[in-house]
Amino acid sequence: ELWGESMQDTKIIKIVDESDKCVLDDEGVLDVNQTAYVIHGAVLAPTNRHAFALTNPVHLPNPNASDISHLSLQNRHWEWAEFTVVIPCAVQMEPGEVSIVHYGHGFLGDRREVQGDYLAEMANNNRWVLISFDTMGLTRHDLIMILRLCVNQAHLAEEL
């Protein structure tokens, strides 16, 4: 099977049900920072991180090479990529059309940024269901690896 063809490659780790907090106040106003559900899970995704072991020299691929056979899904290594889904109260309280918004964290951030108040407010106001993945190799958890790479492979920056 290829990635995405069955639910065997997806697992739900935790569901946080806060839907009981989705209520209107005395003035009929919804707390726009409140979410109904937060779902934490993981999906089996192809990765190339194994190719960049810090003990080995880094060999960057030739961008002009015509042989791309090494990119097939069957030949890749696979990892569990964790994700977070945020469902705002506005969606839970009034079913209807929604937009799915993939939030990408910045350099050295992580998927938990999707739970910030400013995004909850936008999600409630615009009926967005938010989803975010950790970008493997670029999160705060990868800082030690990035620093080791900079020290051990400093010769890569000589041409800059």
Image (cartoon, rainbow, N blue to C red):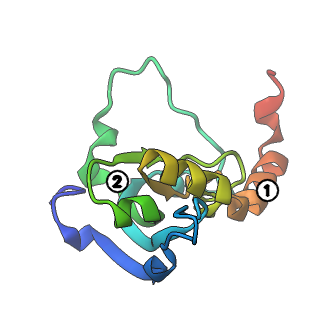
Q: CA distance from mark 1 to mark 2?
A: 25 Å
For label 1, the SS is helix
Front residue of 62 and 46? 46
In the rendered image, which quarter contains the C terminus? top right
x then y, percent, for residue 3: 24, 56
Q: What residue is disc 2 on? A: 76
Q: Is residue 50 above or below residue 68?
A: below
Q: What residue is disc 1 on? A: 148
Q: Is residue 20 above or below residue 104?
A: below
Choose the circle earlier in sequence order: 1 or 2: 2
For label 2, the SS is loop
Q: Is residue 107 above or below residue 55?
A: above
x then y, percent, for residue 107: 70, 46
Q: Can see residue 127? A: yes
In the rendered image, which quarter contains the N terminus? bottom left
Residue at image position (27%, 68%) is 9
**What kind of residue is marked 2?**
Arg
**What kind of residue is marked 1?**
Arg
Q: Can see residue 88? A: no
Q: Residues within 10 Å of mark 1 (few under 14, many from 20)?
A: few
Residue at image position (33%, 48%) is 98
x then y, percent, for residue 112: 61, 64
